[in-house]
Image (cartoon, grey):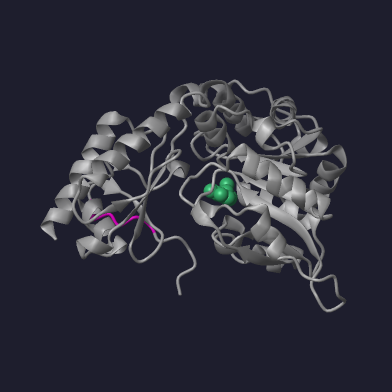
Amino acid sequence: MVYAPVRPDRSLPPVLVNLFSDTQTRPSAAMKDAMMLAEVGDEQNGDDPGVNALCDRMAALTGKESAVFLPTGTMCNQIALLVHTRRGDEILAHESSHIVGNEGGAPGALAGSVVLGLRGARGMFDSATMTAALREKRRNAPPQTLVAVEQTTNAGGGAVWPLDLLSDVLASAHRLGMKTHMDGARLMNAAVAAGISAGAFAEHCDSVWLDFTKGLGAPVGAVLCGSAAFIDQAWRWKQRLGGAMRQAGICAAACLYALDHHVDRLAEDHANARTLAAGLAEVPGLAVEEPETNLVFFDTRASGLTADTLAARVRREGLSVSTVGTYRVRACTHLDVDAAGVDTAVQIIAGAIRGA
Ligand SMILES: *Cc1c(COP(=O)(O)O)cnc(C)c1O
């Protein structure tokens, strides 16, 4: 088994259109300028002005008392689980969620909690499904202490939890005595797509975080928000895990730049995703899921090609996409892909299917 990333295959042509992930966005020249000009200090000592400004803005944006800057979204999720749960606790989350399948088993490895995967369309579940998963409070049952949701849902198709469904699930969790956590890796995509503020979506969350390295286009950084008491505990774990930094303002400057310049434009990514989905829907052999934000998923089964075969073929034509199952492909729009790139992508995929 190879655990380290595989280096790019130099025999392949350069990537012309990168729909692999919105994590692969490059900092723009203006973002780099903002980083160059950043005033910095010792972050773990509370002295970095850029980090402090970013945390204040994120706390205000999500309607929470306080916030902490962390290197990655995964660390936001895991620190939240470390604060909210104890060893042996059970977390209720969608079975397709990032904490279940994409964080190396970290809930078990770090907090020592287990995740009970709930089912539901597009990465979401309702309060009836959640309530049905509750265990009798017996000595031999794991304590169920936390409900975690993703906004938007990643493997669920980039779907946006409708506010009433989300509020019902999270308020019910609170009434049942559980804490609530939102993995808001793409929270601003949800806010822009729905025209609902991040704060409204996060209202019933004890913790919520935003990733700056997805569609917001920053090179490093995520911010975890919650009550002052929660963030105090989170800081202890940040220190323990080696996430306490030094002149991190150079990274926070990119995040502040992204908040100012890259939020409203997420609407362009969503429009490009709709155009991409509409184009792919015309290609025989593909079944395309209706995108709600910047993630487009499609099924290749009827084309006779597996997702990996299609991805390898289009890569030879300069298009990069990711695969998330034998027949499921994910194509992601972001600030480094324009409408012309989307048209090229449709042509390359259609050509690869015809060649089959
Ligand atoms: C990307 C992502 C994460 C992890 O974020 P990193 O910054 O890559 O660690 C967590 N949850 C969801 C839903 C994501 O899409």
Q: Is residue 70 visible?
A: no
> 319 or 171: nearer the eye?
171
Residue 234, percent from left and from top: 79, 47
As drawn, which residue projects farthest toward the front?
128
> 227 or 251: nearer the eye?
227
Residue 251, percent from left and from top: 61, 33
Indicate the quadrant where residue 257 lies: top right
Question: Which residue: 18% across, 42% down?
Answer: 347
> 347 or 44: nearer the eye?
347
Quadrant in the picture for the N terminus: bottom left
Q: Is residue 257 visible?
A: yes
Question: Which residue: 45% across, 39% down?
Answer: 292
Q: How many circles with numbers are drawn on the protein?
A: 0
Whether the magenta-drawn stretch holds residue 9 is answered as yes
Magenta stretch bounds:
7-12
Left or right position of 151 against 148: left
Q: In the picture shown, does residue 180 fall above or below 340? A: below
As drawn, which residue projects farthest toward the left?
355
Question: Which residue: 80% across, 34% down?
Answer: 66
Query: Magenta span: helix, strand or loop, mainly?
Result: loop
Indicate the quadrant where residue 114 lies: bottom right
Residue 11, percent from left and from top: 23, 56
> 265 or 128: nearer the eye?
128
Residue 326, percent from left and from top: 35, 66
Left or right position of 192 against 351: right
Whether the magenta-drawn stretch holds residue 26 is answered as no
Q: In the picture shown, does residue 108 fall above or below 243? A: below
Quadrant in the picture for the C terminus: bottom left
Indicate the quadrant where residue 163 lies: top right
